[in-house]
Amino acid sequence: MPTGLPMNIWLDDGDSAIDVIDALALSPFATGTQPWARQAHLERVRPDAALQPAHGELTHIAKVEDGTESRLLRGEGWTLRVVRHRNRTATVSVTATSEDLAKSVLRECTDGAEEPEPTADHTRMGFWWRGPHGGHRSEKPITTQGWDQIKGNYSGQAQGPIERLMATTPEQIAGRLVLLHGPPGTGKTTLLRTLAGQWRDWCQVDCVLDPEHLFDEPGYLMEVAVGYDEDDDSESRWRLLVLEDCDELIRAGAKAATGQGLSRLLNLTDGLLGQGRDVLVAITTNEDLTRLHPAVVRPGRCLAQIEVGALSQQEASGWLGSGDGIGPEGATLAELYAKRSGRAIAPAAAHEPTGLYL
């Protein structure tokens, strides 16, 4: 193992005190004096959590106005960098002279540092985005409701297909695409949150925040498709990738508009890439089914293809408890919530690709 490698640091007026701490924390690893590194990202850090070992010297501390605080500590054979943020997240990085020492210091800093995760009405969901150095994934708890709690938010026509989707098990999976289509504000996003809770025992749900990059960059697509394998998982889990409002990707003219984007989506759901991994893809769109590319809706492609539309006049009146203001065309879920709270919502223009998210 090389030791004593030279390291020079250049600073200018664009660098901050936190940048200096970052460089000092990296120095022992870069020079080879502490060649083992371990890092942990924490959520919901307890306010009283020290995030440092019982023994060690605090050498540097820097704070900025946005609430971020960075600390540098040193001990016998190890260096520790702790960055805490106002939103109660933190990053703890350790370099050490041995792997066991690095693990030990990191464990002492992080054990018991996070508050227990809410469990009653929460489900863990992953969120992917493309950063300067590749894909990043962060896992957060999201609130979910059971299907019985939200069933009345959907038309009688949609309830049957939705119930079958909710009851799906891995053994019943045929197609790899879940397609939810319908006007804005009809509850497609709420439906996906409920699905994440319903499938939590066998499927990890990940939301891709930038699908326009996902199918434009093969490297990013591979990162997301392959995912992260957990070494301590005794059983492999399916994964559901959620892509919201992907109208341009799947409409009839998608091939001309997005180049290889449509082909890569189809490969993920029905090609070598998708078949090699237990991956499902859920897409929401405001487009009418007749305007979608025929390759997307061909028989066998979709595990579920559900139109999530407005409630009929009778259904909307029952939901609201009154027929006041409900026209013969019925109402969307967003319109009903607005009416119940006393607000008025102008209908979205026909060409508007985005709308009210529920």
Image: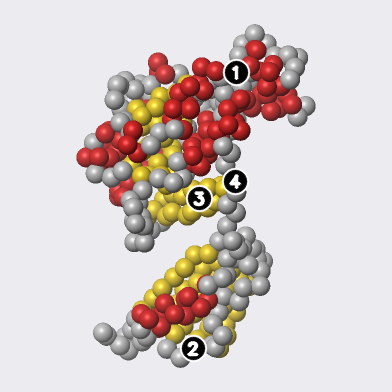
Q: Residue furthest top?
A: 328
Distance from label 2 to label 1 (Cα)? 64 Å
Residue 294, image quadrant: top left
Instruction: Identify which residue is drawn at 22% across, 40% down.
Output: 272
* Quarter residue 243 falls in: top left
Q: Residue at x 68, y 18 (%)?
A: 318
Observer-nearest of 21 and 195: 195
Mark whose residue sits in front, 2 or 1:
1
Mark 3–mark 2 distance (CA, rounded to whole Å):
36 Å
- Answer with mark 4 or mark 2, whichever residue precedes in sequence: 2
- Residue topped by disc 2: 75
**Residue ID for mark 3:** 124
Secondary element type, mark 3 = strand
Cβ–Cβ under 8 Å for marks 3 and 1: no
| Residue 331 percent across, percent down from the top left | 63, 18
- Depth check, front residue: 345 or 127: 127
The amino acid sitting under disc 2 is: Gly
Amino acid under label 4? Asp
Residue 191 shown left or right of residue 236 in the figure: right
Crowd rating for badge 3 (residues with CA inside 10 Å; few <14, some 14–19, many 20+): some
Pointer 1 or 4: first along the chain? 4
- Secondary structure of the residue carrying tag 2 is strand
- In the figure, is residue 15 to the left or right of 224? right
Callout 2 environment at 10 Å: few (<14), some (14 to 19), or many (20+)?
some
For the image, the number of numbered tags is 4
- Foreground mark, 1 or 4, reads 4
Estimate the spatial distance between the alpha carbons at disc 3 and disc 1, rounded to whole Å: 30 Å
What x and y, as percent, mark residue 228?
Answer: 36, 55
The residue at which mark 4 appears reads as 121
User: Quick check: 1 above or below 304?
Assistant: below
